Amino acid sequence: MPDTGFQQVGLKVDRRLTLLENAIKKHQYKKDALLEILHTAQELYGYLDRSLLTYISKLLRLPPSHVYGVATFYNLFKLKKPGAHVVTVCMGTACYVKGAEEIVSTIEKEFNFKRGETTEDGRLSLFVTRCIGACAMAPNAIVDGETIGKATPEEVLKKIRTILEAAKVEAR
Ligand code: FES
């Protein structure tokens, strides 16, 4: 394996890093596998921070500015650590037509933040995504990993409130 200097970029050596290295190895350190590798990294870490992007750039021998540019170009990559709870609303065509925008704007209004952001208290993040492959159940929203099909703004809000309330009780 090439000398990647993972300690220099501040990454902890753990299972996620091993899996990421294996994925990069599988792609034979090819530069054109960058998108694929960014996907894998996000799946493993939940988001792509600067240290992770620097690390990937070293492994693929690409300029960090290029890797960062690709990661910021595609809005499916998250560059900041998400909040404690995450809502993702599908904005693919079927979901959009069936009212996904209303779900997103209702959440934005209710919690006073915008899609792609995290509330100031760090408790909730809101993301939108492309088609998640469940168009028959459109519109779809995913709240902390649980998919709500044929979702309504009220239903999604209720779910979010329940989760936030439960987290508050747990923290007491
Ligand atoms: S468009 Fe939302 S699941 Fe396909």
Image (tube, grey):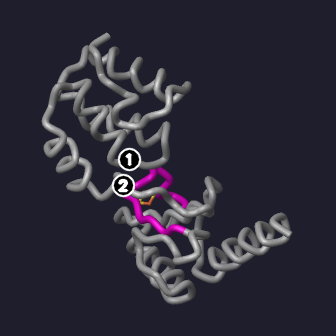
Q: Residue at x 58, y 75 (%)?
A: 121
For mark 2, give the secondary structure. loop
Ligand 1 quarter of the rendering: bottom left
Contact between labelled residues 2 and 1, with CB atoms less than 8 Å apart: yes
Magenta stretch encompasses residue 49: no
Q: Residue at x 66, y 73 (%)?
A: 160
> Residue 26, how many percent across, how many down?
34, 15
> Residue 80, how many percent across, how many down?
41, 58
Q: Earlier in the sequence, mark 1 or mark 2?
A: 1
- Looking at the image, the residue that sits furthest to the front is 8
Taking 16 as reference, is 6 left or right?
A: left
Report the disc number at residue 79. 2
Q: Which residues are magenta?
A: 125-137
Badge 1 is on which residue? 48
Taking 90 as reference, is 26 left or right?
A: left
> Residue 78, how many percent across, how many down?
38, 55
> Residue 120, how many percent across, how many down?
52, 77
Out of 17 and 33, give the one closest to the viewer. Answer: 17
